[in-house]
Image (cartoon, grey):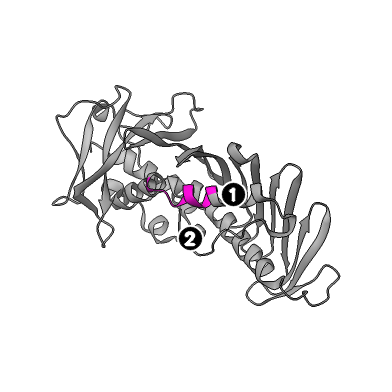
Amino acid sequence: MLAACTEVTAPGAGPSGSPAISRGLAAIERASASPAVQAVEQLGRVANGARAHIGASARASTDPLMQLSSVPVASGTTMATLLRPAALGRVFRYEPAQGRYVATSERGAPTNGVRVILYDALATGEPNIEKETGYADLSNVDSLPRERTGIRMAVVMGGATRLVYTVSTRTDSAAANVIAEGVVTESADSVFFRVDASRAAPDERPRALRSAVRVPSEDLEVYATLASDNASSDQTIELVIASFPHETILDWRVRAGRLTATIIADGQIVARADGTPATPRYLGADGEPLPEGTEEWVVNYFAWFDDLVSQAAGFATSGVPLLEFAAALGG
């Protein structure tokens, strides 16, 4: 979930010159790198041995959406109630000797869910049981349609709720879909997000992503849409960064391997890119060389734009191993 957003620093106010946009993007960056968000990834890595139940073809795929149809469901559950009935009300701790979380006799777990103790990570990525960082309460999402699988996760660190994260999936013979939404609270800022990612299965043809991120303290809204086709490598991405009265739009299109992209600030084209996605050429509004002193922010904006879209996809696909983790608890 985090790899994409940590490679490029948030680009600041950019072409609109809005301090609120700069502060809002920095708040998103802090939230994405927060320990509470990292906890989702850590539990996904542990996965409590659930991946042993995944078929070889799904396990070999590098696309988490490919694995949706292989999320294990225990006896006594339905697609809408993923946690095992025997696990409800239990507190789970990591057991290094077994490489998984095991139930304890401790109290405090929600009656309709489980409590999972969180830890710092060792260099290997495995939980360090000597350093607890908080806990995560996981519960079934009872309001989901029967064809969807979902988990709600609340991460508590330092006595405060730092993350509320709900992820649900749907798969059938024609398509797979993940919806992730929630709020991250880091420092004085709360960052709200919703991501809807879909793909056609099993042939990996067109996929789509829609995401929205809000930072109310800065009146900032970030919207991203993506449509791509693995067969042709065609891709269309639009990113909108808005804090009234300012708005920056980044439009990125790839057709037959050729790139055309623009940055529009407050209704005016301020920069373009062409060439290929791997070797873009950055230009001014009318296709002229960029004015001196502007190339750095243009390059940074295009790079961070790509990272932000990847980050949004990560919020959804990182939920897949979390579902695997939840489904295997108590097994």
1 and 2 marks in contact (CB < 8 Å): no
Q: Nearer the viewer, residue 115 or 232?
A: 115
> In the image, is 95 to the left or to the right of 186?
left
Q: Is residue 49 above or below residue 91?
A: below
State the residue at coordinates (28%, 52%). Answer: 52
Residue 149: name its quadrant.
top left
Q: Nearer the viewer, residue 171 or 258?
A: 258
- Percent of width and height locating residue 216: 60, 36
> In the image, is 81 to the left or to the right of 16?
left
> Neighbour class for label 2 at 10 Å: few (<14), some, many (≥20)?
some
Q: Decide if residue 188 is in sight here.
A: yes
State the residue at coordinates (71%, 73%). Answer: 293
- Magenta stretch containing residue 207, yes or no? no
- Percent of width and height locating residue 46: 29, 50
Q: Which residue is mark 1?
A: 23
User: Please, what secondary structure does the residue beneath circle 2 have?
Assistant: helix
Residue 273: name its quadrant.
bottom right
- Percent of width and height locating residue 141: 43, 28
Q: Is residue 39 above or below residue 143?
A: below
User: Please, what secondary structure does the residue beneath circle 1 have?
Assistant: helix
State the residue at coordinates (61%, 62%). Answer: 230
Q: Decide if residue 257 is in sight here.
A: no
* Number of residue marks: 2
- Percent of width and height locating residue 53: 31, 49
* Kind of residue indicated by mark 2: Thr
Q: Is residue 314 above or below residue 82?
A: below
Q: Nearer the viewer, residue 273 or 167?
A: 273
Q: Which residue is mark 2?
A: 6
Q: What segment is highlighted magenta in the picture?
A: 27-35
